[in-house]
Image (spheres, helix red, strand yellow):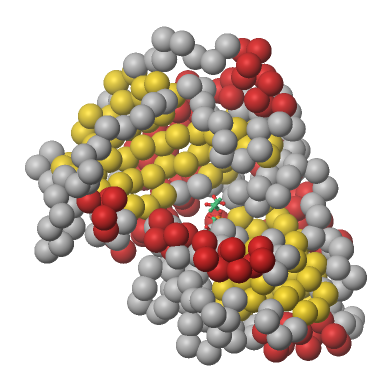
Amino acid sequence: MTATTDFEIHPASGPLPAAQRAAVLEDPGFGQTFTDHMVTMRWSAERGWHDGRLEPYGSFTLEPATSVFHYGQAMFEGMKAYRQHDGSITLFRPEENAARFNASARRMAMPELPPEVFVESLELLVSQDRGWVPEGAGRSLYLRPFMIATDPALGFTHPSRTFLFCVVASPATAYFGGGPPTSLTVWLSTSFTRAVRGGTGFAKTGGNYAGAFAAGLEATAHGCDQVVWLDAMEHSWVEEMGGMNLFFVFAREGARPRLMTPALTGTLLPGITRDSLLRLAPRLGYDAVEGQISIDEWREECAAGTLTEVFACGTAAVIAPVGAVRSERECWTVGDGRPGPITLRLREELLGIQHGSAPDPDGWVRHV
Ligand code: PLP
Ligand code: COI
């Protein structure tokens, strides 16, 4: 895990004019426009990490035989830089992304990056392109660090011996829009499986997402917004959604509401938003546990009125309420189908911490 932390700085000679940038920041959407710069760094078996650069955002030239095109040895992270009310800029728990990046790297037989270099690369890009961080709750600069295998060879006897690390940044509104959240209708996929024990489900690797597109099309064809992935063996236990973890809110007579999120079995992504909410919820007066829930329990507890809210959470999505559930066989609503009060309260608190209007007792926020 050796690395040079000396990034060479090569600023863009023609950054986007401020007026055009302001027009983009008015309504950035998600992942459509990229800032003026990117960070790149190379790894080889002989030299370890080297050749770190901040340079103008632009294309790579790669041979057709490049390993990543054929065997998908690739991984990424997703995180955001937030504009605070006083104009300063923060990251949210970036060291957790650094740790997850390395967990993905180990699973994909790729080189780990020292966490301080990972964070330094983000801070470098955000500092350089700070004018690209939009203002307003729900808006942010989405950061996408990723790594690809770059050996120009088709041999499959060993992993690539060269890699490219890169960070790009894109101004973003929350994945499902910036305004008050509207409820999602979700699709229970019983014909497709996302991940199995021992597979790559916990890693943030492109193949997990490539394999999800067909189920996404199935969901769209049934009028749904997102796929809920179930366990591979029984297609019965709820795991997560394509880019988000799930929380279930149970009302209890005379007791604190209980939040439950599926336990980390190795088949789902250990979301940093998920972890933050598990820690945050008790401070707001809710119990929060990891557990398991089957689709039958989901339907029955909704019918009984004991499961009152369900929401998805993730960096891109923030917190998105789930209002209705569909599968080939059935369909039901969660509560009255509209965003529930606990969902909205958690969303407000999380965005408050991220944008600096709520206290940050755990020291999650890091100024750039
Ligand atoms: N699950 C999957 C498959 C994801 O892609 C994401 C997004 O990164 C999440 C869950 C949520 O993770 P986080 O809260 O760290 O963004
Ligand atoms: C994120 O929330 O950062 C993700 O990676 C989800 C995504 C696939 C858009």
Q: How many marks?
A: 0
Which residue corresponds to the image point at 61% horizontal and 68% vertical from the top-left?
Answer: 218
Residue 169 position, x and y percent, is: 50, 33
Q: Quadrant of residue 251?
A: bottom right
Res. 289 in view: no
The quadrant in which residue 306 appears is: bottom right
Residue at 16% from the left image edge and 45% from the top image edge: 152
Residue 95, visible in the rendered structure: yes
Q: Residue 213: x, y in percent? A: 52, 61
Q: Is residue 213 above or below residue 317?
A: below
Q: Residue furthest front?
A: 221
Q: Is residue 77 left or right of residue 289?
A: left
Q: On the picture, is 91 further left or further right than 303?
A: left
Q: Residue furthest left?
A: 46
**In the rendering, at what x and y percent does residue 282 appear?**
72, 65
Name the residue rendered at 42%, 78% in the picture.
196
Frontmost residue, 89 versus 330: 330
12 or 51, nearer to the observer = 12
- Seen at 67% across and 72% down, the residue is 187
Residue 31 in the image: above or below residue 346: above
Asked whether, in this view, residue 199 is left or right of residue 246, the answer is: left
Q: Position of residue 48 (x, y in %)?
A: 17, 42
**Residue 340 drawn above or below residue 176:** below
